[in-house]
Image (cartoon, rainbow, N blue to C red):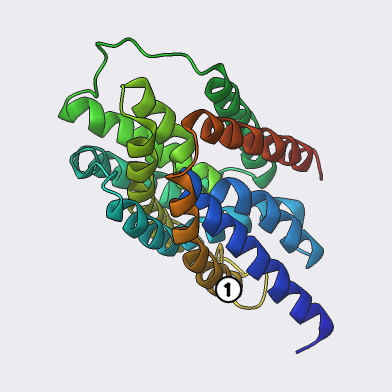
Amino acid sequence: MSELGWILVLELLALGSVAGFMAGLLGIGGGMMMVPAMTWIFGTLGVNPGDAVKLAIATSMATIVFTSISSVRAHHAHGVVRWDLLRGLAPGIVAGGLLTGAGLFSLLKGQGLALFFALFIGFSAVQMLRDRKPKPSRQMPGPFGQAAAGGFIGLISGLLGAGGAFLSVPFMIWCNVPIRQAVGTSAALGFPIAAANTVGYLIAGWSMKPPLPGAIGYLYLPALAIVAVASVSLAPLGARVAHRTDTRRLKRIFATMLFGLAAYMAWQSQRG
């Protein structure tokens, strides 16, 4: 393997390790971190900025299929996964994910997706830092409301290549679900989000010319394999740390990370 090839492998191993740890710690599937990092990596490999963003979003989402399984097992062991909420939100998530992956994603330009990523993630960070307390009487909505919320989460997550925690965690906290239960349940929601969107990306990109050797449409398989192995290995450690960390500190960690990634993607959206 060439020196450049080894550097790429090491970069992807490091990315997967950090993303897996954060997935366990915060319930995120790693997409908030992986999309900007993969966008940069694919750019160094000569992929034009627009295609680099799309390749990063789709590949990042596919890795969440594996990361979420490892993360949710760790959270389930601590008894903080609300399976009743998973059953209520999952149908809408699958529908929204398929709509995005197989339809909207291929229609939008990469620069537009990067700007949308930056704006939405920046907004999510502000909301997390505000730490507004929900009304004590507020509860999760009924089956129809949960399905609608799931549809929105699945659709937006597919546009961003993320596991949905940036939406599902604040939404559940707003409905008075304790933060550790929100994080654990969000980790479980990452699987249907990632699976539905990945199927959609494969449908949408099946006939396109691969931007890199080893890619199938929007999915870059070498990065998927390397990042998935590393992230699955570190997710349980992040989950263990989460259950020993103050909830307010978790929120600040989440928000700070989102601000930095939003700034990078805003810059990326302005490139030609």
Which quadrant is the C terminus positioned in? top right
Q: Which residue is mark 1?
A: 226
Q: Residue 88's quadrant in the figure?
A: top left
> In this rendering, does residue 260 appear at all?
yes
Q: Position of residue 220 (x, y in %)?
A: 59, 69
Q: Position of residue 105 (x, y in %)?
A: 51, 47
Tag 1's secondary structure?
A: helix
165 and 219: which one is in front?
165
Q: Position of residue 252 (x, y in %)?
A: 59, 30
Q: Residue 176's quadrant in the figure?
A: top left
Residue pictured at 64% horizontal, 70% vertical: 13
105 and 154: which one is in front?
154
Residue pictured at 62% horizontal, 41% vertical: 113
Seen in the picture, residue 81 relative to 58 is either above or below; the reply is above
Q: Position of residue 76 (x, y in %)?
A: 28, 53
Instruction: Give amino acid for label 1.
Output: Ile
Left of 11 or right of it: where is 165?
left
